[in-house]
Image (cartoon, rainbow, N blue to C red):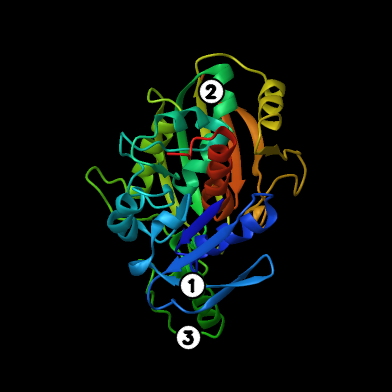
Amino acid sequence: MNIAIVGATGNVGRKILEVLEKKELSIDNLYLVASSKSAGSKIKFRGQEHEILDLDNFDFSKAKITFFAAGGNISEKFDEKAAKNSMIIDNSSFFRMDPDVPLIVPQVNSEDLKKIKKNIIANPNCSTAQLVIALKPLHDLFKIKRVVTSTYQSVSGGGKAPMDELIEQTKLVLNNKKVESKNFTKQIAFNVIPHIDEFSDGGYTKEELKMANETKKILDNKINITSTCVRIPVLVSHAESVNIEFEKSFTLEEIKEALDNFEGCKVVDNRFDGGYTTPIEAEGKNETFISRIREDKTIKNGLNLWIVSDNLLRGAALNAVEIAETLIKNNFYGK
């Protein structure tokens, strides 16, 4: 199998390489592709150094599967051209709501891979990915009517520059020096910002609308969902406070069993100090962790959850590689 990664030098591109290192995926030739600025540099993979190739000159017919992890502008410019000769797994938001492009979390809706029309598959928003993997087994059993989420998203969701800025801002604050934000609308160090992406009509941000629209596309268009997305001063892993209203009644034992038995989920729900998962513990882990499981007594068939996952893995690189694995296993890629 020949594989290419566009954006191989970025946060998600490097994470895809890390995931591939640990997987048993057979790779005959690996092509690492990036902008002309990075071309010529080298990255080691499975003991061998690979030279970074210039995106503008890359021949996509060399790769059976190509991961795009370089942002929406690059996807807009190159995906459809590349898809003429390669199966594209795209990590940007550009194609997610395209009706002819399946939006995939393999554990949730792998059957939608049968609907490929453009040789492009979209990877969902990082917060959506961890949400739907927890909602899926519960929706199958108890039918979800409504979901209310508040997200607590790490700065790595914005890329490497925001991560570097959080560290720099923290140093400045600790040394009583003035902070000027470059990648954030306000100071992020020792603060939280209730604003991710641009504002749209109605007062919601694009990030909040992505969560609603993508969840509907992946899971069930009839689910009502509203979100507030917040950036927090954490480097890696997103957390979500989730309130769910079901059509059917449930017991907490049924909820925990359904979650714990679903691929990709892990219940850590102990009612004592520290008996839950936080972003630091989720970093570097493949699982989506669910804690603080309790009934919402204010509505009929209501439930509260705390969901945490590594956004660079479940929300990006790991999900993308699992899409590739599913393609190969089911021979969908051979177009």
Question: Is residue 301 at all visible to an observer of this figure?
Answer: no
Q: Nearer the viewer, residue 175 or 135?
A: 135
Q: What element carries label 2?
A: helix
Q: Residue at x 43, y 25 (%)?
A: 220
In the rendered image, the vertical position of residue 313 relative to residue 132, given as above or below? below
Q: Residue at x 50, y 66 (%)?
A: 32
What residue did someone put label 1 on?
52
Q: Earlier in the sequence, mark 3 or mark 2?
A: 2
Type of residue at label 3?
Lys
Lateral position of residue 112 relative to residue 287, left or right: left
Question: Is residue 171 at all visible to an observer of this figure?
Answer: yes
Q: Do the residues labelled 1 and 3 touch (CB within 8 Å)?
A: no
- From the top left corner, tell me how far across and down residue 76 is, in percent: 29, 54
Categorize mark 3 by other alpha carbons within 10 Å: few (<14), some (14-19), many (20+).
few
Cα gap from disc 1 to disc 3, whole angstroms: 39 Å
Q: Earlier in the sequence, mark 1 or mark 3?
A: 1
Q: Residue at x 45, y 45 (%)?
A: 123
What residue did someone put label 3 on?
177
In the rendered image, the vertical position of residue 37 relative to residue 60, given as above or below? below
In the rendered image, the vertical position of residue 220 relative to residue 22, given as above or below? above
Lateral position of residue 76 relative to residue 172, left or right: left
- From the top left corner, tell me how far across and down residue 83 is, in percent: 36, 48
Categorize mark 2 by other alpha carbons within 10 Å: few (<14), some (14-19), many (20+).
some
Figure label count: 3
Categorize mark 1 by other alpha carbons within 10 Å: few (<14), some (14-19), many (20+).
many
Type of residue at label 2?
His
Q: Is mark 3 on a helix, strand or loop?
A: loop
- From the top left corner, tell me how far across and down residue 243 is, in percent: 52, 33
What residue did someone put label 2 on?
139
| Image quarter of the C terminus | top left
